Image (cartoon, grey):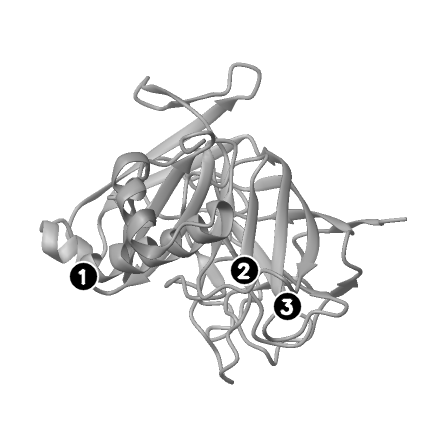
């Protein structure tokens, strides 16, 4: 019978990088579920005050190994081998009580392009879980729709890999479609997979144009894991409550769109037996392309085929 495991956000399970040298803190069987606790992406232990960057953060971080998003894991899945596909079912997500959105105030290529490196703002949010809303210190209220920004595994290449850019094996995808009820499919490149999760978002718009969403801790990300050896992928795809989603990542936005399109054409062949030109014609009629994010070193594009769009 499938087991349910719990993995808390503590020193043994927290890390800020991807690496196939990182030993798993938990090994599970296909079909098992894990209830992950996650800090916010910036390792915070409390909300910002809305004025400056000073707050309590997780202590004892390694400047190299913990420099990226605060991730919980890694989890090894027995039997996972390179060439297989890991299916990650998002059963439910429970965010914490607060979140933060930042805009400007630090140097990076995106802020430099917008001319906002010298001055920034913090929007500090509190959540009404019953109403599924967030309210900031200025009185603005928005709807929340939680998802995990980072879900992924290390690539086959040895060494330390940044958590910032998404890649073939997942990572900082930042796709707002990956809400509860979704299944994310990821190519496996290392033995056991070594899955990690973090970067909880209470809400985000496509593009994530300030570099941050509503970044928040997550009390419980309930995920179930399965393995597929009949569904080989070149890039992550997902089946969400809205529809099928294919993804493309590249430094060039046009190339990212082409990668997402190629993945959608392959998916249309799998789902409907369509050859390339027929798939392209129907994709032009039924598939919507969105800019996932523009701030993670590589650009992201995701294509959405709504359920029932082709019958």
- In percent of width and height, residue 218 lies at 58, 41
Would you say residue 42 is visible in this rendering? no
Residue 292 in the image: above or below residue 134: below
User: In the image, 243: left or right of 284?
Assistant: right
Is tag 1's residue or tag 3's residue first in the polypeptide sequence?
A: 1
Residue 205 placement, left or right of 157? left
Which x, y percent locates residue 106? 23, 55
**Mark 1 vs mark 3, CA separation in Å:** 31 Å
| Earlier-in-chain disc, 3 versus 2 | 2
Ranked by sequence position, the earlier of labels 1 and 2 is 1
Question: On the image, numbered disc 1 is attached to which residue?
Answer: 109
Residue under label 2: 186
Q: In the image, which is nearer the foreground, mark 1 or mark 2?
A: 2
Q: Which one is nearer the viewer's eye here, 97 or 281? A: 281
**Residue 277 visible to the viewer:** yes
Neighbour class for label 3 at 10 Å: few (<14), some, many (≥20)? many
Q: CA distance from mark 1 to mark 2?
A: 29 Å
Residue at image point 50% right, 20% down: 132
Which residue of the protein is positioned furthest toward the right in this rendering?
1
Q: In this figure, which residue is indicated by the disc labeled 3?
A: 194
**Residue 208 percent coordinates (x, y):** 30, 43
Q: Residue furthest top?
A: 131
Relative to the observer, which residue lies in front, 63 or 257?
257
Q: Are marks 1 and 3 in contact (CB under 8 Å)?
A: no
């Amino acid at each position: 019978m499938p087991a349910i495991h719990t993995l808390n956000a503590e020193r043994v399970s927290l890390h800020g990088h991807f690496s196939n040298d990182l030993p798993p803190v938990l090994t599970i069987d296909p079909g098992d579920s894990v209830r992950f606790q996650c800090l916010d992406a910036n390792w915070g232990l409390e909300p910002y005050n809305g004025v400056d960057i000073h707050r309590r953060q997780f202590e004892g971080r390694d400047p190299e190994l913990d420099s990226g998003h605060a991730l919980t894991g890694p989890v090894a899945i027995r039997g996972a081998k390179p060439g297989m596909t890991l299916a990650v079912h998002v059963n439910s997500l429970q965010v914490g009580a607060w979140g933060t959105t930042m805009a400007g105030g630090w140097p990076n290529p995106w802020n430099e392009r917008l001319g906002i490196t010298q001055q920034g703002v913090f929007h500090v949010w509190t959540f009404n879980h019953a109403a599924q809303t967030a309210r900031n210190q200025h009185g603005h209220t928005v709807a929340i729709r939680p998802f995990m920004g980072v879900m992924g595994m290390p690539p086959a290449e040895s060494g330390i890999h940044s958590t910032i850019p998404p890649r073939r094996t997942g990572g900082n995808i930042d796709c707002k479609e990956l809400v509860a009820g979704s299944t994310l499919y990821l190519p496996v490149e290392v033995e056991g997979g070594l899955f990690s999760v973090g970067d909880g978002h209470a809400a985000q718009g496509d593009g994530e144009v300030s570099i941050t969403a509503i970044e928040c801790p997550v009390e419980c990300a309930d995920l179930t894991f399965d393995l597929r050896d009949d569904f080989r992928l070149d890039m992550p795809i997902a089946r969400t409550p809205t529809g099928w989603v294919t993804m493309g990542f590249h430094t060039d936005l046009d190339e990212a769109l082409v990668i997402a399109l190629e993945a959608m054409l392959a998916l249309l062949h799998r789902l409907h037996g369509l050859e390339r030109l027929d798939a392209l014609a129907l994709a032009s009629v039924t598939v919507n392309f969105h800019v996932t994010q523009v701030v993670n070193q590589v650009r992201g594009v995701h294509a959405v085929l709504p359920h029932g769009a082709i019958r």
